Amino acid sequence: MKKIAKTFGLLLCGLLATGVIPGPPLLAAESVDVGAVNAYAIDNMFLFIAAVLVLFMQAGFAMVETGLNSAKNTVNILFKNLIDLSLGVILFYFIGYGLMYPGDAFSGGWFGFSGFGVSMDAPDAVGGNLHPAVDFLFQVAFAATAATIVSGAVAGRMKFEAYLIYTVIITAFIYPISGMWKWGGGWLDALGFYDFAGSLVVHALGGFAGLAAAIVLGPRIGRFNADGSPNALPGHNLAMSSLGVFILLIGWFGFNPGSQLAIAGADNTSIVMVIATNTMLAAAAGAVVAMIFAWILFKKPDLTMALNGLLGGLVGITANCDSVTFNEALIIGAVAGILVVVGIKMLDMLKIDDPVGAWPVHGLNGIWGGLATGIFGGHPMVAQIIGSIAIPVWGFVTMLVLFLILKAAGILRVSRDDEMKGLDISEHEEEAYHGFQIFSNQ
């Protein structure tokens, strides 16, 4: 057999050499930069994995919000998280992406549009160049994050059709326009405002949109007494919420490191590792300090405060994770942990019902992330202050107007009877826990 194989091999080589059987075309060494081609593949694969991790955060948000709310609203919350992603992807594809990235010729403005849809044309295979498809996939995951933050703030009392309208507006217009101000080369970018991965562009926008919704909707039944004192309405499954926070932590390693948009080459690899470590340090500091601060205030360690403290630390570091030292990341996370607890107490004092702490985590700490970028990151402080005001105001005012219109039209909040029954039955006629009788005074 060996002799036969050897003879066949020699015969094949001879046929190839004489041209009887054509071989593959030979490429001149100078015509292909193998290193650049490899860098292109590595960078695009890196961003693809990062996009998947950010999309995985949708599962985290769904679990956090579901666990921190009544069991009778489980289907409704899960449905909102599913549909704001699904509907948001389609709207961002047709409209939002073109608004957010109006093109290289656009500079320093307030509004631009590069066209509908996303190009399928591949760029030159050179390191640092991204295929438009993977860039869209990464960016749409960010848009979904901004939209879904509001879901937790409105839990248990918003009509499903109102949430669909909100999703259309924020994903197609509100988020892309303010995102363009920085990431699309708009006026905030021209001022020198810096937001590496979206403390303000993503999280503060969603957090302040959630605050507007919570104000217009009003609190859940039983959340506050006649004298204004708050009542705790405990979530039905803190195990689920804890799992959700861990999923969000994992997803954040796509959110922050992925925002470098490249990993090929020593410089990119080094900064990605720094970003990842800063992300972890800030998250840990946020959880520990929120636990300690809440323990001092309430005389007992509170799991939900620590969970939100971890998320607050992640939000605070997101704008500056590429610009600060490890020790500064710990400080940023520690301050974020305090702000989460303070923010939740502020909402109670103002009789604003935010069931999951969306505004303290994403809104308040989004602003902190923007300011910390100037304090620790070396970016122009005036520009950071302007950006840290403009984006939250944009998100709050536009969404306040939208929710007031929906309220005036009578399609914002469910009836008292439906709220008492639970939105799973009243809105969807489905049960998350079939076979169990769920009693609730919420």
Image (cartoon, rainbow, N blue to C red):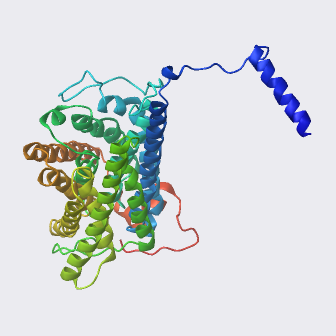
Front residue of this view, candidates 85 and 411:
85
Which residue is pictured at 45% across the width and 44% down the height? 46
Front residue of this view, candidates 413 and 49:
49
The image shows a total of numbered marks equal to 0
The x, y position of residue 438, in whole percent, is: 48, 73
Front residue of this view, candidates 11 and 347:
11
Left or right: where 135 falls relative to 12: left
Which residue is pictured at 74% across the width and 17% down the height? 22
The x, y position of residue 331, in whole percent, is: 19, 64
Left or right: where 284 falls relative to 189: right
Q: Could you tell me which quadrant the N terminus lies in? A: top right
The x, y position of residue 231, in whole percent, is: 26, 76
Q: Quadrant of residue 195?
A: top left
Which residue in the rendered view is the most extreme toward the top?
19
Left or right: where 377 falls relative to 437: left
Q: Quadrant of residue 175?
A: top left
Q: Could you tell me which quadrant the C terminus lies in? A: bottom left
Which residue is pictured at 64% across the width and 18% down the height? 25
Which residue in the rendered view is the most extreme toward the left?
382
Observer able to see residue 355: no
Q: Is residue 385 above or below residue 22?
A: below
The x, y position of residue 323, in whole percent, is: 22, 50
Observer able to see residue 187: yes
Q: Is residue 363 above or below residue 48?
A: below
